[in-house]
Amino acid sequence: MTILETTSPRSERRASTRQIWLLTVLLSLLLLSALSLRFGLRPISWDNIWESFVAYDATRADHLVIQGMRLPRLLAAWLAGGALAGSGALIQSLTRNPLADPGLLGINGGASLGVILCIFLLGISDPASFVWVAMGGGLLSTVLVFFLGGAGRGTPLRLILAGAALSALFLALGRSLLLISQRSLDVYRFWVLGGLDGIEMPTLAALLPFFALGAAFAAVSSFNLNAMMLGEDTARSLGLRVGLARGLAVCAIVCLCGATVSMAGPIAFVGLIVPHMARRFSGADMRWCLLFSAFLGAGLMILADLIGRLPVFGGNMQAGVMAALLGGPALVWLIRRDGSTAL
Amino acid sequence: MNAPARLHAKALSVAFAKTPILKDLTADIPDGKITVIVGPNACGKSTLLRSLARLQKPDSGEVLLDGKSIHKQANRSVAQRLAILPQSPSAPEGLTVQDLVTRGRTPHQSALRQWSHQDAEAVGRALELTGMAPYANRPLEALSGGQRQRAWIAMALAQDTEILLLDEPTTYLDLPHQIELLSLIQSFNQQSNQTVAMVLHDINLAARFADHIIALRAGAIFTKGSPAEVVTRNNMEQVFDLRCQIISDPVHGTPHVIPE
């Protein structure tokens, strides 16, 4: 028992710093959310924002902008950033590869090909109708990658290789279609940059079940991955059903990223870098890493979208592009500040 | 040995890419004893241990744990009774000793019920027994090889199982650290009557620490028994192709191999 007295204060102190950090991150997130409602091409006063929630008046332009544009955008940024960064944390841990990105499972490649085919063959150009095509393409290609990667029995390396191969194939197929069709390219290039323009409440509501399901799978997976990160043999020895755990994590990633890509296009980079930021606060515990990733990812997307909407950038910089512009230097700064520790 | 041992291999055959590794092997792991599996390289030692721990599925035959096929039991329930430390396991960067040892409690937890007083107690006990408590908050990569190995053993101890399997736990350790680690394992066995089975390369260390030795040759048991029964001049020549003299260890009285 003496040992408990000597070790527990230390580990408790560490746990409580983590909680304080999480609270700080959450508060910053709320602050950013408020700012995101207030600023844009033109600022809207706090009073008007408040009124648009409690006494909505469809004849007032400010209310329309808040409820019809900025609020859906904000929610989409929360969902997209949280989902991408959370699934990034999952895939990096699942494949034990710090450079893994959720797009590596072929979701983005499949979704892109689906959208291109849809434009090319059916001549559809309305972004709202891309949602289910992108979702279908993403789902299908992930299923393909998962089984080519050996299903529950393959190695993480095999999974990554299958994903990389199929992604490259889908990308090449898509590009060759775009080469022969200028019209498809015009429609596609807006979708592929990844942004939160024109997302409306009904779309969000339709995709919400996927986000919720993905979050539930992710929560269970974070517990499993804590054991999986010690290697497959150790995980099995600790009583885990490794194949099932791997399948569950892939389901979480598919739900989260599939819903995101169909909502906002393929947003790269957030899923790759935010988990590295999160790990600085969470340590090696996957449950904390997932929480921090989700909140930091949401924060980054909201900030990126907010800055991208400012008049300086013509009010129309895609959030996906801006997220990478902000996140890249931020990560470099974090690495340089810590000096000794690697990624 | 009247009652059957809790862990038993029955007519086990394993092949990799059609090369047979274990051939129709039957063995008991005696309860409450330290069993050491020895044999020349590529004789199937690790495969036997991994099969006993259900990490390797046999092509035919089965491993019985408490009288039932280990592959037909829920993995979690097996993990509450049997722990295995695989050969040179790896951990992600930044993982602390405390984190690692805590993972040993996984089979006693679930995604919904994650931490209990019992868990805290088992983790604290494992850290204390292995002398790793002062290093609890250090990341694994900041430890020496010997300390790191003790941290992994602490994880397996926190799992709180009656049976502990270790695959070459002394690899990469110098002689003093090998002795320290094996003495540690011996003390758990003596204090809590934990059944231990491990693979060791060094026949002299096996002779000193084992109650029971299983000598493998080409995927089959060549001989088994107490160190005095197994470590003989004739057996060493047959199992390892090693010509040697056997003397009695002047300190411990166990057989000691002097290669010629």
Image (cartoon, grey):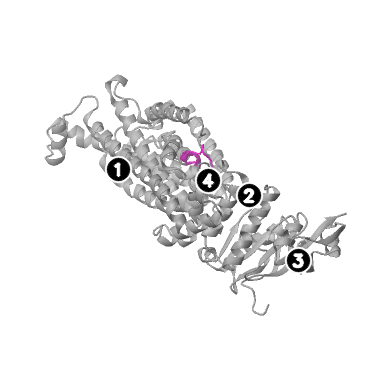
Give whichever of discs 4 and 1 has the lower sequence position. 4
- Residue behind mark 4: A145
- Residue behind mark 1: A204
Chain letter for the residue marked with disc 2 in the picture: B
Q: In the rendered image, which quarter is residue A119 located in? A: top left
- Percent position of residue B153, x then y: 58, 55
Give whichever of discs 3 and 2 has the lower sequence position. 2
Q: Are marks 2 and 1 on the same chain?
A: no
Circle 2 packing at 10 Å, graded few (<14), some (14-19), many (20+), is: few
Q: Tell whether label 4 touches label 3 (CB within 8 Å).
A: no
Compared to residue A64, the image places residue B157 above or below, namely below
B199 or B136: which is nearer to us?
B136
A312 or A314: which is nearer to us?
A312
Q: Mark 4 falls on what kind of element?
A: helix
Residue bounds of the magenta highlight: A95-106
Q: Amino acid at mark 2?
A: Ser
Q: Are marks 4 and 1 on the same chain?
A: yes
**Mark pair 2, 1: CA separation:** 48 Å
Q: Mark 1 falls on what kind of element?
A: helix
Q: Is residue B84 magenta?
A: no
- Residue behind mark 3: B227
